[in-house]
Image (cartoon, rainbow, N blue to C red):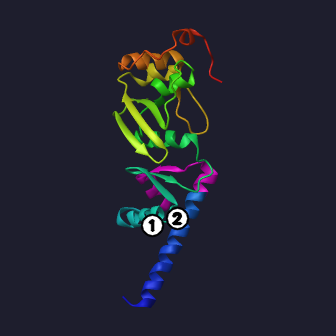
Amino acid sequence: MNMRFYIYSCTLICMKRSEAIDQLREMDAKYSCYVYCKNELAVVLGEQGQKLNRTLSSLVSAKALVRAARGVYVFAYSSHLGEGTLHQVAKRLRSGELVWESLESALSRWNVISQIPVDRVTFMTTGREGEFHTPYGVIEFTHCKLSWDRILPNLIARDDGLTPLASKQWAYRDLKAVGRNLDLVDMDELEDDDDWN
């Protein structure tokens, strides 16, 4: 390969990478979109197939994208990175399914259990069970067989990219339904009628 061609190729790669980063910045600024499935990035970047794979590899090596899990990417320069990032990754991993924070994570938020899960969020989902270790923490999915119309009235919507939170009683119901340890549950706190603020 001659040197002139090599320099030209490197220049094109840098220009393409720069354009892709600009597009991701625009999506972040205008729409607060910063966590993507691969097929969503195909639309945002206007590429597919091997061309898309090369662009994604280039963006990951430049540390503009973080490969959070298989097929899920996070824009590293986003102004929205924070607690909600792990929740956004969870939603992308179970795209098309209902995902909510429940079990020990939710009961800890409700002060019903004193043990706080560290670097882990326990989610219920209408999708498959599984555990994913990401740069943002561990995602633990537990399957729920109930229909959406049975689940949704028991969830509390939240801002900042967080998944819905199970109500106190619903999180306890989930904990019992999946056979988790109930020893840490403060029954007095469970009976209090706290509202989520």
Tell me the element at label 1: helix
As drawn, 156 above or below 97: above
For disc 2, the marked residue is 20
141 with respect to 22 (left or right):
left
Between 101 and 109, the one lying in front of the other is 109
Identity, as a three-letter code, of the amino acid under mark 1: Ser
**Going 63% across and 53% down the picture, which residue do you hit?**
29
The residue closer to the viewer here, 109 or 193, is 109
- Dot 1, crowdedness within 10 Å: few (<14), some or many (≥20)? some
- The percent position of residue 89, horizontal first and vertical second, equals 47, 43
Q: Name the outermost residue toward the right.
A: 197
Query: What is the secondary structure assignment of the residue under circle 2?
Result: helix
Res 14 label: none
In this rendering, the label closer to the viewer, 1 or 2:
1
Count of numbered labels shown in the rendering: 2
Residue bounds of the magenta highlight: 26-46
Reading the image, the residue beneath label 1 is 58
Q: Position of residue 151 (x, y in %)?
A: 45, 22
Q: Point out the image quarter for the C terminus.
A: top right
Which is the main secondary structure of the residues drawn in magenta? helix
Q: Do the residues labelled 1 and 2 touch (CB within 8 Å)?
A: yes
Q: Position of residue 101 (x, y in %)?
A: 49, 29
Q: Considering depth in this image, is 95 or 113 the residue closer to the camera?
A: 113
The image quadrant that residue 129 belongs to is: top left
